[in-house]
Image (tube, rainbow, N blue to C red):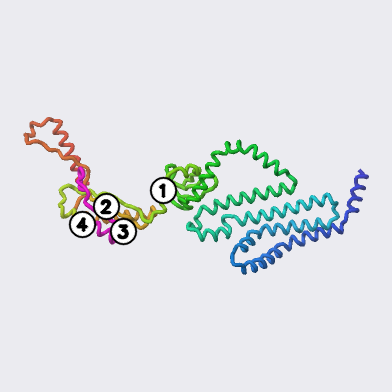
């Protein structure tokens, strides 16, 4: 036990304390000054970047801000280790760790630079037709970031003398089995590419297909997220959407309303003509109605009514605004009918009886006539 303490004491006495203290001083000095160094360097670089004709250099600087702060910590640790009397074989490991950290910093910065929320993609989205709602840029961002991550890991593996060729050869041998196993995933990925390139819809659009109807929230490699009217989230495989007919209701410039107004038989022709003319005039004067196509016509003799066909479009396409406009028109049609003294028809039957004495009728006929008369009186009272 005494020998152990003697050896331990001798070990600590023989340590190069001056070098260790100098190394600790270097590390903490750079660690505490990294924020000021980063701020100064960034201000200098942004000042230079503003003189360039494009914003690409500025976007790169912003993407590398956090990785650069992390790099100063690694740099301080590396310089501190360099000041220590480390043997050559261990110094090789230190250098390898330092190079790995640099690779991580570069990959991290490029990963940030290609983010869909980065200023670079924001500039690109502002120049596209879909703007910030475009799904092409987030989809491309995911692909590019995946490639950057794969390349970074590959370079790090090569730095640590991992046999990349053996890995590639192994992937080649297992490629067929992987393709068969991932056939469904590959189909969804290709379906996603078809969707983002053809752009049948964009983020926030109201779409309907044979599978689902709702608002598009996001699209990724495998699926598309759609928020239904019940506020539930439906995740649809891209392959399914790519092979279905898709109706994009958000692309409507105007929204259709059509219905029939059935008035009673026996309504004078002049009254029907006035009702038709007044309904058409009301639609023409309504600010919520598109005046390009308005059809109000006495269309047909129905089984129990004279039908007036009404066909027009509202300027609003949103479901709530469209319903509000439809309600306004319904009330105005009711008011026109009331003012003209025209009644709405309801399903009815006419019974024709031969001229004969009522006492000679069978009891079944008398009962049927009484029931129908009672129903007619009830409808009239309504």
Q: CA distance from mark 1 to mark 3?
A: 23 Å
- Disc 4 and disc 3 in contact, CB within 8 angstroms: no
Residue at position x 65%, y 48% from top?
A: 150
Q: Disc 2, disc 1: CB below 8 Å?
A: no
Q: Which mark lies nearer to you, 4 or 2?
A: 2
| In-image side of 20 versus 379 (left or right) | right
Which residue was labeled with disc 2? 310
Magenta stretch encompasses residue 60: no
Q: Which residue is mark 1?
A: 247
Among the two numbered marks 4 and 1 on one chain, the one whose residue lies closer to the N terminus: 1
Percent position of residue 332, x then y: 27, 56
Q: Earlier in the sequence, mark 2 or mark 1?
A: 1
Work out whether mark 4 precedes mark 3 in sequence or the reverse, and give the earlier one.
3
**Tag of residue 339:** 4
Q: What SS does tag 1 mark?
A: strand
Q: How many marks?
A: 4
Badge 3 density bin: few <14, some 14–19, many ≥20, Cα 10 Å: few
Per the image, label 2 sits on a secondary structure element best described as: strand
Q: In the rendering, which numbered label is found on residue 292?
A: 3
Residue span colored magenta:
278-306
What residue is rendered at 59% in x and 64% in y?
Answer: 55
């Amino acid at each position: 036990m005494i020998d152990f303490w003697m050896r331990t004491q001798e070990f600590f006495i023989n340590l190069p304390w001056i070098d260790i203290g100098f190394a600790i001083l270097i590390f903490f000095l750079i660690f505490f000054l990294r924020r000021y160094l980063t701020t100064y360097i960034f201000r200098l670089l942004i000042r230079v970047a503003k003189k360039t004709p494009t914003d690409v250099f500025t976007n790169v600087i912003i993407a590398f801000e956090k990785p650069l702060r992390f790099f100063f910590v690694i740099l301080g640790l590396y310089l501190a280790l360099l000041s220590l009397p480390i043997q050559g074989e261990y110094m090789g490991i230190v250098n390898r760790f330092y190079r790995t950290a640099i690779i991580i910093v570069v990959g991290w910065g490029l990963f940030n630079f290609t983010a869909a929320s980065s200023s670079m993609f924001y500039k690109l989205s502002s120049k596209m037709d879909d703007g910030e709602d475009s799904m092409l840029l987030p989809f491309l961002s995911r692909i590019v970031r995946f490639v950057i991550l794969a390349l970074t890991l590959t370079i790090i593996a090569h730095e640590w003398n991992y046999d990349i060729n053996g890995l590639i050869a192994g992937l080649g041998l297992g490629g067929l089995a992987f393709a068969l196993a991932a056939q469904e995933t590959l189909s969804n990925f290709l379906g996603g590419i078809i969707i983002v390139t053809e752009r049948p819809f964009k983020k926030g659009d109201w779409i309907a297909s044979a599978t689902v109807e709702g608002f598009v929230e996001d699209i990724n490699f495998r699926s598309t997220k759609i928020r239904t009217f019940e506020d539930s989230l439906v995740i649809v495989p891209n392959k399914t959407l790519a092979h279905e007919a898709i109706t994009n209701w958000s692309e409507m410039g105007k929204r259709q309303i059509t219905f029939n107004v059935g008035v009673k038989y026996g309504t004078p022709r002049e009254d029907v003509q006035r009702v038709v003319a007044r309904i058409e005039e009301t639609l023409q004067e309504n600010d919520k109605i598109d005046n390009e196509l308005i059809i109000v016509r006495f269309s047909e003799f129905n089984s129990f009514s004279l039908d007036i066909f009404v066909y027009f479009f509202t300027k609003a396409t949103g479901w709530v605004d469209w319903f509000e406009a439809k309600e306004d028109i319904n009330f105005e049609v009711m008011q026109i009918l009331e003012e003209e003294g025209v009644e709405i028809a309801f399903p009815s039957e006419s019974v024709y009886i031969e001229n004969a004495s009522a006492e000679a009728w069978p009891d079944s006929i008398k009962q049927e006539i009484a029931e129908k008369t009672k129903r007619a009186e009830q409808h009239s009272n309504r």
